[in-house]
């Protein structure tokens, strides 16, 4: 079985996007963040947490969703409430996370690893992870039917080639538990 090394994802991403989008995937520390080019760095940086392969995929998914203007703003200018959200904040979090987590699921599958949704909340509110995963699965299927963005397709193809995984179909996501 292939062991997934975060250095491989750095290489795959940077070979695919560094020249064309002036963006690099970079090992970060505790908190992931997107940093646009500035006086300290001539390239945009996607920093993922602690060398976690899945963190890299999640942060890449957010980059793949962000449009050109958003990629000029730290962390894309997105709303984020940290762990400990109340029910209303959690519902908003899940609403905005469906698309990036659908892309993350496709990336995970193209790399040959399992996917787990992230509700990113350890508070004591009740969270229906199965319902959230169902919404993410529905979005993946919409992408499979209607097509991913060109950047997403570029990375999916690069991952397929590197990991020698089969092309994604709706069947790729049917047997994974919700």
Image (spheres, rainbow, N blue to C red):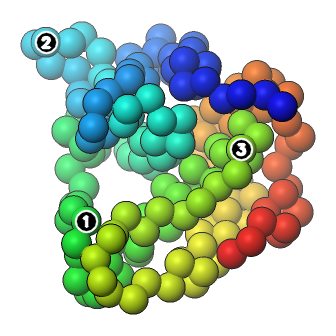
* Residue on which the image places disc 2: 40
Image quadrant containing the C terminus: bottom right
Residue at 23% x, 83% y: name it: 86
Q: Secondary structure at mark 1?
A: loop
Q: Position of residue 53 (x, y in %)?
A: 54, 35
Q: Percent position (x, y) of residue 37?
A: 22, 21
Residue drawn at x 61%, y 24% as measured from the top left = 5
Residue 10 at least partly seen: yes
The label nearer to you, 1 versus 2, is 1
Q: Nearer the viewer, mark 2 or mark 3?
A: 3
Q: Which residue is mark 1?
A: 83
**Relative image position of residue 8 (x, y in whole percent):** 61, 19
Residue 16 visible in image: no
**Which label sits on residue 119?**
none
Q: Residue at x 35, y 82 (%)?
A: 91
Instruction: Name which of mark 2 and mark 3 comes first in the sequence.
Output: 2
Element carrying mark 2: loop
Disc 3 versus disc 1: distance between alpha carbons?
26 Å
Q: Residue furthest left?
A: 39
């Amino acid at each position: 079985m292939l062991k997934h090394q975060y250095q491989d994802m750095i290489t795959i991403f940077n070979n695919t996007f560094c020249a064309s989008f002036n963006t690099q995937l970079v090992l970060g520390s505790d908190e992931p963040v997107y940093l646009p080019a500035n006086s300290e760095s001539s390239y945009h940086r996607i920093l993922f947490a602690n060398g976690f392969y899945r963190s890299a995929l999640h942060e890449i998914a957010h980059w793949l969703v962000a449009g050109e203007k958003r990629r000029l703003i730290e962390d894309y200018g997105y709303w984020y409430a940290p762990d400990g959200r109340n029910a209303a904040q959690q519902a908003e979090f899940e609403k905005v996370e469906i698309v990036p987590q659908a892309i993350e699921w496709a990336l995970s599958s193209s790399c040959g690893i399992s996917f787990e949704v992230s509700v990113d909340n350890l508070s004591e509110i009740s969270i229906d992870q199965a319902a959230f995963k169902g919404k993410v699965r529905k979005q993946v299927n919409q992408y499979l039917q209607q097509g991913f963005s060109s950047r997403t397709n570029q990375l999916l193809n690069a991952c397929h080639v590197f990991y020698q995984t089969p092309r994604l179909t709706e069947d790729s996501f049917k047997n994974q538990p919700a």
